[in-house]
Amino acid sequence: MTVPDAPVSSAVSAEPLDLASHLAAVSDPHAGAIANFVGVVRDHDPAAGGRVILLEYQAHPDAGRILEELATRFATDGARVAVSHRVGRLGVGDLALVCAVSTAHRADAFDRCRALVEAIKAELPIWKRQHTADGDATWVGLS
């Protein structure tokens, strides 16, 4: 992640993600609320056609810059944002996305966190390939 004292901390990383470091990055005496989202690799997906055993995330070279721009969009009016997306091979139970947002009030923290996660899903150039127990592998979200 980038500088922890900044209102925005973002990273695209092959290293395991840690919720506690994201919460610490948005900690602020002016904040009365911290909302977070943790995206976890699950063992199923209706489109997979079998039991998912791992995901393989690949990122466009600009993904880090774009993630920082997305985070900055939501770090206004005193809000702080820490967000990271994992790339590489992730097993079931691994953290794929961690987002924390602190604001003065809870409703604003919830709204910004959800909106940021939705923006990441729609705009961040990271793709996943699902591997199933039967040996099949399919790309998700390329259409």
Image: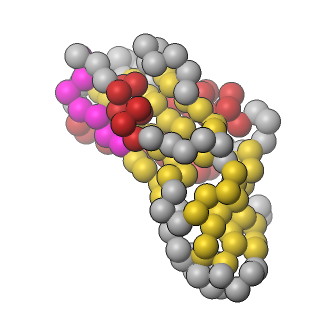
In this rendering, is residue 122 above or below 62?
below
Which residue lies most toward the top here? Answer: 5
Is residue 32 part of the magenta span, yes or no? yes
Q: Residue at x 35, y 33 (%)?
A: 23
Q: Position of residue 112 (x, y in %)?
A: 39, 37
| Residue at the image point whose x is 65% and y is 82% from the top | 133
Q: Is residue 66 above or below residue 136?
A: above
- Magenta residues (range): 30-36
Quarter occupied by the C terminus = bottom right
From this view, report whether residue 116 is shown above or below residue 132: above
Residue 139, x across and y down, in percent: 75, 66
Residue drawn at x 51%, y 43% as measured from the top left: 17
Q: Is residue 141 visible?
A: no
Coordinates of residue 3 in the picture (x, y in percent) = 52, 16
Residue at 20%, 27% in the rendered image? 32
55 shown above or below 123 = below
- Colouring method of the image: secondary structure
Quadrant (top left/top right/bottom left/bottom right) for the N terminus = top right
- On the rendered structure, is 135 left or right of 98? right
Q: Is residue 49 left or right of residue 80?
A: right
Q: Nearer the viewer, residue 75 or 62?
A: 62
Position of residue 32 in the picture relative to residue 51 (left or right): left
**Where on the picture, by quarter, is residue 137?**
bottom right
Q: Residue 80 sits in which quadrant? A: top left
Magenta includes 5?
no
Front residue of this view, candidates 112 and 100? 100
Q: Is residue 114 left or right of residue 62?
A: left
